[in-house]
Image (tube, grey):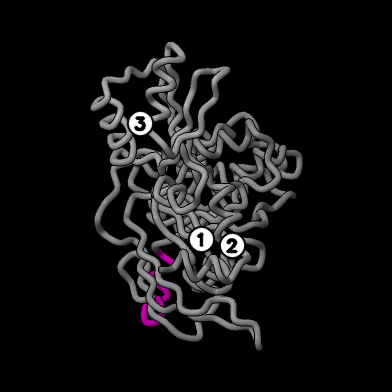
Amino acid sequence: MTTSVSTRSAISVRSLRKSFGDNVVLDGIDLDIAEGSVFALLGPNGAGKTTTVHILSTLVRPDAGDATVGGHDLAQEPDAVRRAIGVTGQFSAVDNLLTGRENLILMADLHHLGRDAGRRRASELLEQFDLFDAASKPAGSYSGGMRRRLDLAMTLVGSPRIIFLDEPTTGLDPRSRRTMWDIIRELVAGGVTIFLTTQYLEEADQLADHIAVLDGGHVVAAGTPTELKRLVPGGHVSLQFIDPDELDSAATSLADAVRDDDTLTLQVPGDGSIRSLRSILDRLDADSIEVANLSIHTPDLDDVFLALTGRPETRKEAVR
């Protein structure tokens, strides 16, 4: 994901807490989400992702903590927060008995856009979401991908600058999922801020500028996708050489490397950073050793997720 991210905060959260009876769901989380970016909140089922969305969209009151959304205090200005945001939840808000156009016009009426303005907005969104040809068909006849696009289009009727997408592509086939990704990228390119929760780690990797991992009521790690991947072991630089003599020399120079004589390669542990790569190449250059091919291998977000969630001792280390 490469976007020009603002330094201004669209959402700021401090010490947010929420319990349901004896179950502590959020235990003092902090978040800072830049305008015009995609923020992804990851975590296992029951970690509190949807609760966080419900709190920040004014659907649930927190027990403690402060938050501003779109520059408005969550507790003191809930109506202003609602005017600034749009929410697409896990379950579709589409009325199956209405046509696609009628669903959008209904939302326009709820936003008090007026008859003509509401119908213009509905037509714009039908065109933008590639639903124009199906506009007069009942939404109940739509495919899963079409329904999800209509659901998001309904969220956009009021032109919100902050959108909460709670697992927006659950159940979609790969093609429909990628179509949704393209729509999200277009929204962000127009300056919209996206707060995304997802169970698809590839989705977060593809879309998010910044990710937080939520587990046990705490944010156990936060950073860019690249930064999070560096938190777990397994990264290495693979070096291939043109002959066994070069391989021998390199193995001597890089004593911590694992060699493969069949492929004339060395695997050197590293976090994939420029500093780590430069250190390896400088050592080889000092010994006049030529590298034929080089590749960098880093852990993916699946590795990060498994390493940082569900294990209290790991959570403590990551928070540090």
Q: CA distance from mark 2 to mark 3?
A: 37 Å
Crowding at label 2, few (<14), some or many (≥20) Cα neighbours within 10 Å? many
Q: Which residue is mark 2?
A: 309
Q: Amino acid at mark 3?
A: Ser
Camera-nearest label, 2 or 3 = 3
Q: Earlier in the sequence, mark 2 or mark 3?
A: 3
What residue appears at the point 59 percent right and 49 percent down from the top-left corner? 168
Q: Residue 29 colored magenta?
A: no
Camera-nearest label, 1 or 2 = 2
Q: Main secondary structure of the magenta part?
A: helix
Residue furthest out toward the top: 243
Q: Amino acid at mark 2?
A: Thr
Number of marks in picture: 3
Q: Which residue is mark 3?
A: 253
* Camera-side residue of 168 and 286: 286
Crowding at label 3, few (<14), some or many (≥20) Cα neighbours within 10 Å? some
Q: Earlier in the sequence, mark 1 or mark 3?
A: 1
* Camera-side residue of 85 and 101: 85
SS assignment at label 2? loop
* Camera-side residue of 312 and 31: 312
Q: CA distance from mark 1 to mark 3?
A: 38 Å
Q: Tell me whether circle 1 and circle 3 mark residues in contact (CB < 8 Å).
A: no
What residue appears at the point 23 percent right and 27 percent down from the top-left corner? 286
> Which segment did they paint magenta?
74-83
Q: Is residue 190 visible?
A: yes
Q: Tell me whether circle 1 and circle 2 mark residues in contact (CB < 8 Å).
A: yes
